[in-house]
Amino acid sequence: MMTARYGGRLAAIGATALLTAAVFVLPAKAETDAKAVIQTYADIALAKYEDSLTTAQALDKAVDALLAKPSVDTLNAAREAWKASRVPYQQTEVYRFGNKLVDDWEGKVNSWPLDEGLIDYVAKSYGTESDTNALYTANVIANKKIEINGKKVDASKLSPEFLSGTLQEAGGVEANVATGYHAIEFLLWGQDLHGTGPGAGERPYTDYDLANCTGGNCDRRAEYLKSASDLLVSDLQDMVNDWKEDGAARKNLVDGEPNTAITAIFTGMGSLSYGELAGERMKLGLLLHDPEEEHDCFSDNTYNSHLYDAIGIRAAYLASYTRLDGTVVQGPSVHDMVKAADPAIDKELSDKLDVSVAKMEAIKARALAGEAYDQQIAEGNTEGNATVQAAIDALIDQTKSIERAVGSLKLNTIAFEGSDSLDAPDKVFK
């Protein structure tokens, strides 16, 4: 099984291994409690997506300010708004894997890695062609006509509809990421050309200055950025609606079998913990010592995105989320169910979730001290590599306890997302 979306650079790297865990088969007398757990899970999802929408709206306003008056200050403000928007969103990723509706939607907002030459100018070191992507250097910002699958396509209007309906995954290539957080990230920072050395992307504000334009096509770059920002807001609004009282995502869980919904909670926890975060987002980059494999590769914000993924996993177990306004959404949880079934396993898992978050915080501490995530995974950085590996080990260890927790609630087998980076690392180098 493969994680939802990688890019052309990972096309040859399969993630086929699976972890298995038992699934709780609910006794009739526990059904009311299970439904309360499911209701809390949905309430927290709504709160997280609402906070994600709020921060995306703030980002959209910061983009407006940048485009209205390009400057060092307005560009930096837009970058900070982008970073802030990642905090609540990353905590929603635990709703993937167990909820098909979320997985089907997620690629619109968080696909990565991307072949950025599709969107805008790139450095010579990027290259000019790819065996897997005909649009590797299409540079739609500079070209009002592009060719997709042998057909000429009018790209004169870089509207939200064009980005989402035509350019996103154009030619059936997943690396053609035209929308979402990472397309916006690239447009705000530009390429990080520092490799595993210090420094993030250094796009100048004048790339948006119509009077003193650098990079060419400042008007079209501004049009693209605005369309991508508007689209992010629209896509997040759709997901907020899906988790409201009559929303499809909530109804799929609340109106379905409690057993299926409880399974979804653990599936999201285990799959994000193991295959996605420990494997594809962390171990792969560490094995290759490749900064191109870090999640927020243009901004050097990866340490924060990984941390809030881990916090999101813990929150799904404990059913507690502190909103941006300081209010807490909490209620009956799978933690309560496991504690009732086997207090020792519950303590084991609770403790390990705390350890994983602490190991991620250690990565963040190094980043804030001046050693970015891409520097930490650099070849020869023994201490940095060890810090990242410690977090990977903690995620793997907690996944084993997630298996035990679900087993304590009994029976049936499910699969957690796997990763060749963890299960068959030799394949990564082929």
Image: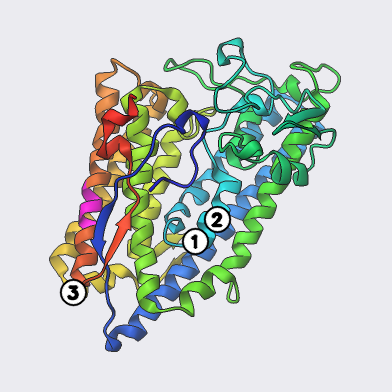
Badge 1 or badge 3: first in the primary sequence:
1
Label 2 close to label 1 by CB (< 8 Å): yes
Quarter in which the C terminus is drawn: top left
Q: Which residue is mark 2?
A: 104
Horizontal side of 170 relative to 349 (left or right) equals right
Q: Is residue 421 above or below residue 215?
A: below
Mark 1–mark 3 distance (CA, rounded to whole Å): 28 Å
Q: Is residue 291 above or below residue 68?
A: above
Badge 3 or badge 2: first in the primary sequence:
2
Mark 3–mark 2 distance (CA, rounded to whole Å): 34 Å
Q: Nearer the viewer, mark 1 or mark 3?
A: 1
Horizontal side of 53 relative to 265 (left or right) equals right
How packed mark 1 is, by other alpha carbons closer than 10 Å (few <14, some 14-19, many 20 or more), is: some
Label 1 close to label 3 by CB (< 8 Å): no
Q: Which residue is mark 1?
A: 100
Residue at the (77%, 47%) spot, across then down: 161
Mark 2–mark 1 distance (CA, rounded to whole Å): 6 Å
Q: In what element is the residue under mark 2?
A: helix
Residue at the (28%, 43%) spot, across then down: 358
